[in-house]
Amino acid sequence: MTLDAILQVVISGLLMGLIYALVAAGLSLIFGLMDVVNFAHGELMMVAMYAVFTLWQVSGLDPLILLPIVAALMFGIGVAIYRLLISRALEVRFNKGMVQIFATFGLAIFIRGFAQMVYGGEFRSITSSWLANRTANIYGVYLPLPQVAASLVCLAAFGILLAINRTEFGRALEATREDREAVALIGIDRDRIFALGWGLGSATVGVAGVMLAGFYYVSPNVGANFALIAYVTVALGGFGSMIGALAAGLLIGEVEAITAQLLEPSLKQVGMFAIYLAVLMFRPRGLFGKI
Amino acid sequence: MKLFGYLAAATLVLGAGQARAADDIVIGAVYPLTGNSAPVGLDAKAAYETAVEIINSTHPEIPMLMGKGGGLDRLGGAKIRIVFADSQADPQKARAETERLITQEHAIAIIGSYTSATAATISQVTERYEVPYMSADNSSPSLNQRGLKWFFRTSPHDEMFTAAMFQFFKDEGEKTGHKVGSVALFYEDSIFGTDSSNVQRKLAGDTKVTVAADIKYRANSPSLSAEAQKLKAANADVLMPSSYTSDAILILKAMNEIGYKPKAIMAQAAGFQEQAFLTGAGALAEGGMSRSSFALDAVKSRPAIAPVNALYKARNNKDLNDNTSRDITALVVLVDAINRAGSVKPEDIRKALVATDVKGSETIMPWAGVKFDETGQNTKGTPVIQQITGGVYHTIWPFDVAVQDAVWGVGP
């Protein structure tokens, strides 16, 4: 293998890894905050992809311009899901865990069915944008511009998430995560924090969805392809840890790219799951997990 | 009293409706109607509904088998009714749904099913219940080689399709001097992809073409960039993909992302024949070639194409493609057999299917005809090779039905 081919593998892994990280970040946020696994996480990403696709079709504006609109929309959807569904699922007295699983799982199936009803099962693509199908060639190594843009946005999103952690709200998030009963005593409205957490988590995966739509197809099942990897990323990085999600996403991207080169491409997920199992065995709280 | 009158009238109407429904001949169709393969399944549904419209309703005659309309004349004008079931492209769900169609819906024949993996389980069930399975659009060669008595397939399979590809390479080489010395195989990891690659590997060996890359990939992967890099390293004369729609879009994008333009693409149809692929891949797909069992542009020799396509388009807002044309053909061949049998007993239908001998000109396909061998495979389904120019497939081989010459090169 030549040097530029090796570099190409590393860069492809890096670009994909950042997307995985951003998809996982929202999941990790909600999981870490309130111990709820959101099985509809991939579907939220799919909703964002359809949203940007529809807005692009109607307005003809570039997905990059539509990014803040979709992120705001997804924030609203996240808050609504918490208020209408999750907060009620949290109130049940027995078998809480199961109820939460079924609530989000049912939501996933509903969203998927709804998307198919509205858009049909067709695969859609954003065919014209500033960056569509463009690449930059740097000394024989190719950089696909839509993915480079996605990676930059991903890094920026992580920057924002980490900055939020340092604000009053971030500290309230952290406190609620540590002891959700005690925070009420110091005047933090737990319900409001949870709702904002859901909003933030959905907006994050929404950003990932918008950037992904720039170089990926949109279909009702597109979320499922990424959701499994997101769960692995969260578990690997440590529940609730943003840095963990980032590191684990990058690790998974690289391991996947390298495994595909060393073994058969159909076995490329083997390396990723091997590392996941090893972490589960030797460090069950994940690479950066505190709990 | 007035209310009673209405109720009585309503009961009569409903009763009459039910009586008519009971006389309908029920055929079960198992397709992926939700999930990743749903677009193809929903197109198939529209295709069958079009065929049923042609068979059942009264209309000017369409020059095609069962194109007369008015139901099945040898069964007193009985109407065909199709009951659809959703397999979600899952072989186990397909098995359960087939059983339900036969036992609950009393389907006297099953038609299906797009993915070959589901056809494998469906045809096991139909064999056990002894009802015919008409394989409309499954292309794995192994399906008819399992000694099944109730399996029939109008469509050519991937061995015949692949033979056509290599024959095309040879013919093109003799005609223009453009030789194909190496191919790269790229295939998804279910029965369709692996069977297709097995045939391609064998035929490449037989025709002394080097297999420069042999890449099996996981269907519906989030990324195919590693696979694209392997294809780039091999840089074969022709890339031969066997992929469903989502992966077909993704691999063309992935190759472009690493600056790789394959010298030529010869696809085992499937996803590459879908409109969603042509739209999604856009200019990247330009020049791509694919086998097909259908030629929309063969209107001269097949006068039924225009009226059938118009009816289908009115229903689904799309032109007929490789899959939907095969679906319509399979259904009319099956219904013609039921009509010839003059009976709804499965054994009579099976005998009529065995005796089928339809001329190509009685179908919408560019085939020599429909005649089943002892394995239930149509031996007269002759494929064509098509190429994408201007975002549309045009027939380029066999040369006698071609509408334009092949051009080598892929992409904008």
Image (cartoon, coloured by chain):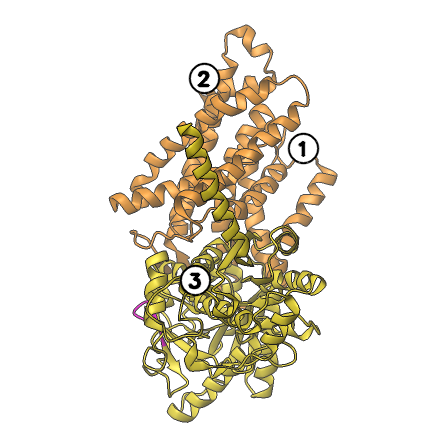
Answer whether residue B393 is magenta in the image: yes
* Residue positioned 56% across, 75% down in the render: B157
* Relative height, residue B50 to residue A225 (above, below): below
Identity of the residue furthest to the front in this view: B1
The percent position of residue B131, horizontal first and vertical second, equals: 65, 64
Three-letter residue code for mark 2: Glu
Q: Nearer the viewer, mark 2 or mark 3?
A: 3
For mark 2, name the chain.
A
Left-right relation of A79 to B150: left
Magenta segment main secondary structure: strand
Which residue lies under the disc numbered 1? A285
Give yes or no for contact between labels 2 and 1 (Cβ–Cβ under 8 Å). no
Which residue lies under the disc numbered 2? A168
Q: The C terminus of chain A lies in which quarter of the figure?
A: top right
* Relative height, residue B60 to residue A14 (above, below): below
Q: Secondary structure at mark 2?
A: helix
* Residue positioned 58% across, 20% down in the render: A90
Answer whether residue B127 is magenta in the image: no
Q: Name the residue nearer the viewer: B169 or B56.
A: B56
Q: Residues within 10 Å of mark 3 (few under 14, many from 20)?
A: many
Chain B display color: yellow
Three-letter residue code for mark 1: Arg
Three-letter residue code for mark 3: Asn
The percent position of residue B266, horizontal first and vertical second, equals: 46, 75
Which residue lies under the disc numbered 3? B56
The percent position of residue A71, horizontal first and vertical second, equals: 38, 34
Highlighted magenta segment, given as a residue range: B389-394
